[in-house]
Image (tube, grey):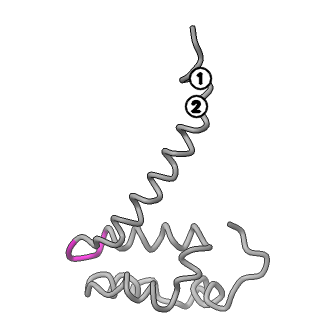
Amino acid sequence: MILEKPTRIQQWYFRRWVPRRFYEELAEEGLLYAFLQDHCARLLREDERFRQDMYEILLRCAPEPVPELERDLLVELCAALSYFLEYTRPWREAKP
């Protein structure tokens, strides 16, 4: 989803001087997912670039698997597969 006007969080996140290491340190401490849900929930929902970046950091830097992240990724996968099945239904149900 493309936002018309950047939110304050987006403006803050995408400035050059914001250290990217901040998110990695939170992930290494096991706190990034909770931080994102508490402080960046709207940005996480609406900005795919931010969401993918945070998911990648969580997968790479978290000391142990994050069950909530895995659930979110499975929900996205299920939605994509459901769309695929609906899109291909005419070809799958066509009689030869």
Our reading of the magenta stretch's main secondary structure is loop
Residue occupying image coordinates x 56% and y 74%: 45
Residue occupying image coordinates x 32% and y 68%: 59
| Labels 1 and 2 touching (C-beta < 8 A) | yes
Q: Residue furthest left?
A: 64
Rendering coords of residue 75 (x, y %):
44, 59
| 81 lies above or below 64 | above
Q: Quadrant of the N terminus?
A: bottom right
At mark 2, the secondary structure is: helix
Q: Residue 91: which numbered mark, if any?
A: 1
Rendering coords of residue 70 (x, y %):
33, 65
Left or right: residue 29 versus residue 2 is left
Q: Which residue is mark 2?
A: 88
Q: Quadrant of the C terminus?
A: top right
Left or right: residue 47 versus residue 65 is right
Rendering coords of residue 89 (x, y %):
58, 30
Q: Residue furthest top?
A: 96
- Tell me where residue 92 sits by quadrant: top right
Q: Amino acid type of disc 2?
A: Thr
Q: Residues within 10 Å of mark 1 (few under 14, many from 20)?
A: few
Q: State the separation of the CA atoms marked 1 and 2.
A: 6 Å
Q: Residue 21: which numbered mark, if any?
A: none
At mark 1, the secondary structure is: helix
Q: Residues within 10 Å of mark 2 (few under 14, many from 20)?
A: few
Magenta-drawn stretch contains 66: no
- Tell me where residue 2 sits by quadrant: bottom right
Query: Which residues, given as a range, are shown in magenta?
Result: 60-64
